[in-house]
Amino acid sequence: MKTAILLVNLGTPDEPTQTGVRRYLREFLSDTRVIEIPPFIWQIILNLFVLTTRPKRVAHAYESVWTDEGSPLLAILKKQASLLQTALANDGKNIPVFPATTYGNPNIKDVMKELHDKGYDDLIVFSLYPQYSATTTGAVFDKVAEYCMRERNMPAIQFTREYHDHPLYIQALVESIKKHWAEHGRADRLLMSFHGIPKPYADKGDPYAEQCRKTAVLVASELGLGANEWAVSFQSRFGAQEWLKPYTDELLGEWGAQGVSVQVLSPAFSADCLETLEELAVENRDNFINAGGKSYEYIPALNTDDLHIEMMRQIVGRYL
């Protein structure tokens, strides 16, 4: 069989404009894995309110982080795919790695069609979400299944589920923090801020929150941090529904009022993107400093870190 690997992340608008963002948000927020409100109700809200107001603000935010290579998330995803392919080749496994996204381009279903046309009939789908959630990894499965439903000759498919406690993932996070400490010194508090999900999703059995907390405990333990030196929080909530707590912005407001220094990272993200580069590194920093915080530093995502790529190589090795 002819094998290929799909390296998948969430996605991004094609361009940092209101039109590009509106098109992306319509696709993303129409997914029932992401928004569990009955579709006929949600589509009214989405089209009459969300898509008439949100794209302008979000497009401005994307424009502030856009690079010469385009969207940071997609640029990093392409580099990760190339580096993973090289790592596999160095291990004697000449298997191509293709970047793909759940929403936007290069869309999973389009990439799978391209691979089918090239004769690849054995696919490994690697979702770059350390902690499993139906809203992320589950959505990847759905997109793959949607493609297969219309194909008579579907490929053999294997999926990664999560790697929230993989030893190399934890080691990579720990080493990135230690490297930041060596260059910038150590702050009073370390905050591990994860992307949030609505609390009812967790109440219904989504293991995401539990896996986030386990990741954080393992990192804090390896660093030898005391109970008052670190915390877990959840960012990027959307709408009026209750999300996982504590909320990142509220916790940083409390810490800012205490006049402490803080360093923040987001272990839920395998690549820096809008939620880390704009929301976490800029917006939350401003709120923290305005609340009286002493200093605020963002520790980048693992991106193309050597240990991160080696972790991917080891995980893929299980499926080869």
Image (cartoon, helix red, strand yellow):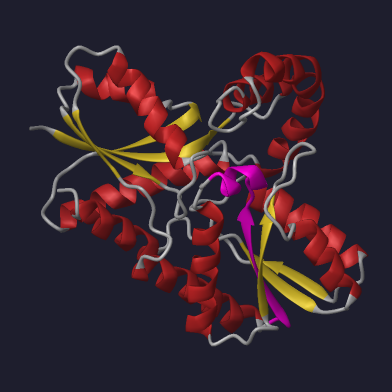
Q: Is residue 269 visible in the rendered structure shown here? A: no
Q: Is residue 216 visible in the rendered structure shown here? A: yes
Residue 193 falls within the magenta-colored stretch: yes
Query: Residue 180 lies in what quarter of the image?
Result: bottom right
**Residue at far front of view:** 204
Residue in the foreground of this view, choosing between 115 and 228: 228
Residue 89 falls within the magenta-colored stretch: no
Reply above or below: 129 against 4.
below
Query: Residue 252 lies in what quarter of the image?
Result: bottom right
Reply above or below: 107 against 276.
above
Q: Residue at x 46, y 33 (%)?
A: 139
* Side (left or right) of 157 relative to 180: left
* Image x and y of residue 257, in percent: 91, 72
Q: Which residues are magenta?
A: 187-204
Q: Residue at x 47, y 46 (%)?
A: 76
* Image x and y of residue 205, in percent: 51, 47
* Image x and y of residue 150, in percent: 30, 12
Q: Residue at x 47, y 55 (%)?
A: 303
Reply above or below: 257 against 85.
below
Marker count (numbered): 0
* Image x and y of residue 142, in percent: 40, 28
* Side (left or right) of 257 relative to 159: right
* Side (left or right) of 288 relative to 39: right
Query: Residue 263 lies in what quarter of the image?
Result: bottom right
**Quadrant of the snapshot with the N terminus:** top left
* Side (left or right) of 201 relative to 107: right
